[in-house]
């Protein structure tokens, strides 16, 4: 087991905080609620137009704010005044989030990056340099993990797998794509599968290599039980493991 990763195997991970209708996902109150329950917290991060980082899942605003536009087209100051859903809570910056968590619980930080590799990864590393809490950085984009391995190899990296079941792709091509995620270039310390992809033939291979296996996203007790049957830890919404 890697240093400071015991929590990754033992502490359930609240997906975007402990959110509900009153506490929007990735909001500071949802993060506070997860801290109060002692859960680790998964958050999503995106780069703003002025090179700062906000905690927000989607690449654009409509679903969570009712407004139009892409996150990357707004500055930090503009985004942090926008309210989430039907609440007074606003989009938080990563700086605010790190200050709130303040090492009380571990963080699973997901880089959302469909664009150039480097700017958000570099900014994140700068911000984490003086952060004293436990964290792992994960992404669906293996390019982000390759960048981290090359520039900040001490950071523990997690590779997220898409739910390949929904992809309309020939099986041979799909197998090649899946194998790309198990690669030496990024050498992830952890991987995370959708619970719908469990079990699969890669699990035993990963365990033999000492890779931590996570399952996402449990939304009921059956999902929790299934993930715990095959994985080291569970990422959850709504249910309380």
Image: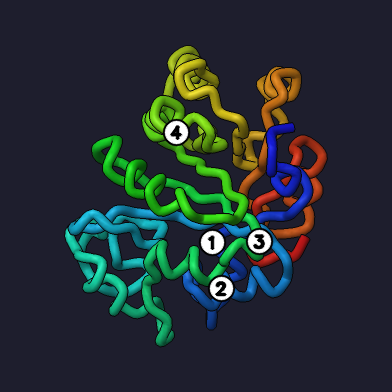
x, y (%) of residue 89? 42, 81
Label whose residue precedes the other's in the sequence (4 or 2): 2
Labelled disc at residue 30: 2
Between label 4 and label 3, give the one nearer the viewer.
Answer: 4
> Is residue 37 rendered to the left or right of residue 41?
right
Q: CA distance from mark 1 to mark 4?
A: 25 Å
Label 4 element class: loop
Quadrant assignment for the C terminus: bottom right
Q: Which residue is mark 3?
A: 105
Quick check: marks 1 and 3 in contact, CB under 8 Å? no
Above or below: residue 219 compared with residue 157: below
> Is residue 64 rendered to the left or right of residue 189?
left
> Is residue 30 rendered to the left or right of residue 71?
right
Q: CA distance from mark 4 to mark 2?
A: 30 Å
Q: CA distance from mark 1 to mark 3?
A: 14 Å
Label whose residue precedes the other's in the sequence (1 or 4): 1
Label 2 element class: helix
Q: Residue at x 66, y 61 (%)?
A: 105
Labelled disc at residue 152: 4
x, y (%) of residue 176? 47, 15
Q: Which residue is mark 1?
A: 16
Label whose residue precedes the other's in the sequence (4 or 3): 3
| Pick the front one: 47 or 172 | 47
Quick check: marks 1 and 2 in contact, CB under 8 Å? yes
Q: CA distance from mark 2 to mark 3?
A: 13 Å
Judge whether residue 171 can be spotted in this image: no
Q: CA distance from mark 4 to mark 3?
A: 22 Å
């Amino acid at each position: 087991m890697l240093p400071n990763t015991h929590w990754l195997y033992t502490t359930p991970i609240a997906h975007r905080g402990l959110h509900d209708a009153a506490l929007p996902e990735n909001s500071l109150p949802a993060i506070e609620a997860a801290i109060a329950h002692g859960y680790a917290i998964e958050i999503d991060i995106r780069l703003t137009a002025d090179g700062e980082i906000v905690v927000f899942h989607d690449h654009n605003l409509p679903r969570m704010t009712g407004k139009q536009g892409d996150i990357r087209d707004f500055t930090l100051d503009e985004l942090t005044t926008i309210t989430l859903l039907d609440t007074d809570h606003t989009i938080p910056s990563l700086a605010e989030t790190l200050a709130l968590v303040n090492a009380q619980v571990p963080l699973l930080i997901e880089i959302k990056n469909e664009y150039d590799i480097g700017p958000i990864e570099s900014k994140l590393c700068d911000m984490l340099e003086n952060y004293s809490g436990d964290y792992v950085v994960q992404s669906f984009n293996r390019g982000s993990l390759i960048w981290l391995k090359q520039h900040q190899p001490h950071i523990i990296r997690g590779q997220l797998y898409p739910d390949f079941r929904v992809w309309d792709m020939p099986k041979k091509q799909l197998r090649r794509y899946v194998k790309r995620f198990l690669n030496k270039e990024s050498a992830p310390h952890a991987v995370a599968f959708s619970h719908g992809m469990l079990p699969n033939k890669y699990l035993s291979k990963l365990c033999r290599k000492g890779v931590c296996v996570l399952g996402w996203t449990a939304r009921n007790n059956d999902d929790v039980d299934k993930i715990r049957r095959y994985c080291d830890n569970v990422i959850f919404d709504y249910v309380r493991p």
